[in-house]
Image (cartoon, helix red, strand yellow):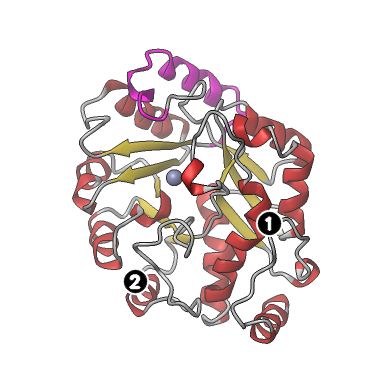
Amino acid sequence: MFGRITSVLVLLLGDGSWPAVGEPNVWSSELSPIADVHLHYSWDQQEVTTPKEAIQRLEDNNVVLAVVSSTPPELALELRELAGDWVIPLFRPYLEPGRRHSWFNDTRVLEAARNALASGKYQGIGEFHMIAGHGPSLKNPVLQGLIELAIEFDVPLLIHTETSSHRYFLPLCKRYPRARFLWAHAGGLLDAGQVGALMDACANVWIELSARDPWRYIHSPIADTEGRLLPAWLALIRRYPDRFMVGSDPVWPVENLHAWDEPDTGWERLGEYLQFHRRWLNALPEPLTERLRLRNAQRFFRNDGR
Ligand SMILES: [Zn+2]
């Protein structure tokens, strides 16, 4: 029923207008429950958004399952402690700020990751960045060790690749068939053909579509200017309806990403990012919408949410 009401509201409001930044989401009581599988709550976000405010924003947007990674990693635990089991902390191997490009040379990471997973407080590993031409290489012991830990503790990995081809990820997902990978931003700049080729080759890779909105990965859209999913993406989702999820990745402003002197106000735009997904999701048949909006994430993270 919620789905139908939301569809009607989206039709009524389907004039291209979005809720303004910082405004409470007027549809919150009518929104269908959604899983957001790509959230961050990092040091530069905590400066402007308290844990309580972050949880309130999730609830206002009817996020019922929230996957969070933070720099430093323990900040994600603050949201979990406040909200409960429907917040899923991932262990991010960036032990302090500034590790995005060097985490794989940090000799402390594997022990920290083992302790984190053994504590039972973290239910996965990620998000971490793999950048073609920069690193880590596939032989890197920290990268390999993290994947082996994920297999040992039977938890998923959220991986962000920066590359022009799906072939970069291919040897990794093939080498570790027992690892469960969630591929951030559907490979970022990659098109549906490349993402589909990787999915064909690696049954252990699931896809999430965070940041593939008109504001961030602007050169590789998944939707048209009306917010409708492009045909190639729709065809791929129909081919693999159990392997797609959505998320917000609330970082903003993009041009200040990881700046040391400005806080990250991304949580103020959470509703906007999720509304982008709700819009194209609501145009799909309900059983398919429900899988992408919620069920696939529940199954993948083995958590029914709140
Ligand atoms: Zn990312």
Residue bearing mark 2: 236
Assign ligand 1 to one image quadrant. Answer: top left
214 inside magenta stretch: no
Q: Secondary structure at mark 1?
A: strand
Q: How many marks?
A: 2
Q: Residues within 10 Å of mark 2 (few under 14, many from 20)?
A: some
108 inside magenta stretch: yes
Residue drawn at the location 34% of the way across and 63% of the way down: 220
Query: Left of 176 or right of it: where is 77?
Result: right
Query: Left of 196 or right of it: where is 262?
Result: right
Residue drawn at the location 65% of the way across and 52% of the way down: 65
Rendered location of residue 53, percent (x, y): 77, 44
Query: Left of 7 or right of it: where is 165?
Result: left
Which residue is nearer to you in this view: 201 or 134? 134
Rendered location of residue 190, percent (x, y): 29, 58
Residue drawn at the location 68% of the way across and 58% of the way down: 21
Q: What residue type is disc 1 on?
A: Val
Residue bearing mark 1: 63
Which residue is nearer to you in this view: 149 or 54? 54
Q: Secondary structure at mark 2?
A: helix
Q: Residues within 10 Å of mark 1 (few under 14, many from 20)?
A: many
Q: Give the magenta-colored segment's residue range.
A: 100-123
Q: CA distance from mark 1 to mark 2?
A: 25 Å
Rendered location of residue 5, percent (x, y): 72, 81
Q: What residue type is disc 2 on?
A: Leu
Rendered location of residue 64, percent (x, y): 69, 55
